[in-house]
Image: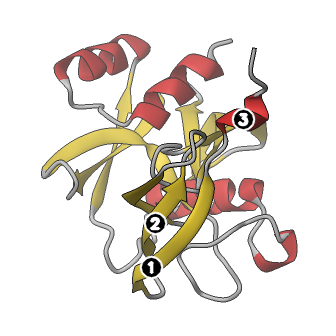
C-alpha cells in the first residue's frame, strides 16, 4: 500500500494570469505521482471569509437576498463576508494573523453591516476550504443566536441586498427550490444544528 505522501503533486511552474488587489488567478503545471507533467491546472487565491448562521430573538433565521454573478441570479443566503487584510488585498494566506482581521471580529462586523443586527451569543462551528479543487481560501462558520436589531445597514459600494427573516421550514423550501444555493451556507446550517 502506498503512503499518502505518494499522492502529492509537485508544482513545476506557475504563471500569474491575473494578480491584482482582488484575485491571484494562476495557470500551473504539476508533476503527478507517476512522474508525468500535466498542465494547465487553473487555481486562484481569494481571502478567507465568514458565514454567520444568525437567528433573531424569535428563532427566525436572518438572511440576505442579493445578486450572485457566478450563477446570474438573486439568491437567499446567510450573512457572509471577507476577513479584512491590513495590506488591502482580497487574497493571500491568512495564516499571518497579525496581517488579518480575526474571524469572530469579521463575523460581528459583517452581521451588523449587512443586517443591522447584533448578538451577545456567538459560537464558532468550523473552518472549511471554500473550494479545495481550485481555491486556497477558507470559510469560517459561526452561529449567532438571539440577535436584535440595533441599526440600519451599512453596505459596501458593491453590496445591494435585502434582509429577510425565515423559519427553518422556509429555509428548507428555499434550499429545495434552488433559491438558497450556496454550499457553504447549507453546510453551515446543518453543522449549526449539531
Sequence-wise, the earlier of marks 2 and 1 is 1
Helix, strand or loop at mark 1: strand
Question: On the picture, is 73 further left or further right than 56?
Answer: left
Helix, strand or loop at mark 3: helix
Q: Toward the viewer: 115 or 42?
A: 42
* Residue marked by disc 1: 15
State the residue lying farthest toward the front: 35
Tell me the quarter of the image containing the C terminus: top right
Q: Residues within 10 Å of mark 3 (few under 14, many from 20)?
A: few
- Asked if one can make out residue 49 in the rendered structure from this viewpoint, the answer is no
Question: On the picture, is 190 further left or further right than 72?
Answer: right
* Residue marked by disc 3: 6
User: Going 58% across and 56% down the picture, which residue do you hit?
Assistant: 137
User: Going 41% across and 76% down the picture, which residue do you hit?
Assistant: 156
| Residue 39 position by quadrant | bottom left
- Asked if one can make out residue 14 in the rendered structure from this viewpoint, the answer is yes
Picture coordinates of residue 130, whole percent (x, y): 52, 45
* Residue marked by disc 2: 28
Picture coordinates of residue 127, whole percent (x, y): 69, 40
Helix, strand or loop at mark 2: strand
Q: Residues within 10 Å of mark 1 (few under 14, many from 20)?
A: few
Measure the C-alpha gap from mark 2 to mark 1. Answer: 6 Å
Establish if 173 lies above or below 56.
Answer: above
Picture coordinates of residue 158, whole percent (x, y): 31, 75
Badges 2 and 3: C-beta atoms under 8 Å apart? no
Badges 1 and 3: C-beta atoms under 8 Å apart? no
Amino acid at each position: 500500500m502506498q503512503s499518502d505522501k505518494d499522492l502529492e503533486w509537485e508544482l513545476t511552474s506557475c504563471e500569474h494570469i491575473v494578480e491584482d488587489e482582488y484575485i491571484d488567478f494562476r495557470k500551473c503545471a504539476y508533476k503527478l505521482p507517476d512522474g508525468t507533467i500535466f498542465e494547465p491546472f487553473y487555481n486562484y487565491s481569494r481571502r478567507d471569509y465568514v458565514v454567520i448562521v444568525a437567528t433573531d430573538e424569535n428563532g427566525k433565521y436572518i438572511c440576505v437576498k442579493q445578486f450572485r454573478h457566478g450563477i446570474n441570479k438573486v439568491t437567499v443566503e446567510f450573512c457572509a463576508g471577507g476577513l479584512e487584510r491590513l495590506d488591502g488585498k482580497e487574497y493571500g494566506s491568512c495564516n499571518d494573523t497579525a496581517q488579518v482581521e480575526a474571524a469572530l471580529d469579521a463575523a460581528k462586523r459583517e452581521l451588523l453591516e449587512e443586517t443591522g443586527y447584533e448578538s451577545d451569543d456567538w459560537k464558532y462551528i468550523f473552518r472549511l476550504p471554500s473550494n479545495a479543487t481550485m481555491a486556497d481560501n477558507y470559510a469560517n462558520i459561526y452561529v449567532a443566536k438571539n440577535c436584535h436589531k440595533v441599526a440600519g445597514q451599512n453596505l459596501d459600494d458593491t453590496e445591494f441586498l435585502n434582509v429577510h427573516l425565515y423559519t427553518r421550514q422556509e429555509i428548507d423550501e428555499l434550499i429545495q427550490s434552488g433559491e438558497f444555493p450556496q454550499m457553504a451556507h447549507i453546510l453551515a446550517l446543518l453543522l449549526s444544528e449539531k
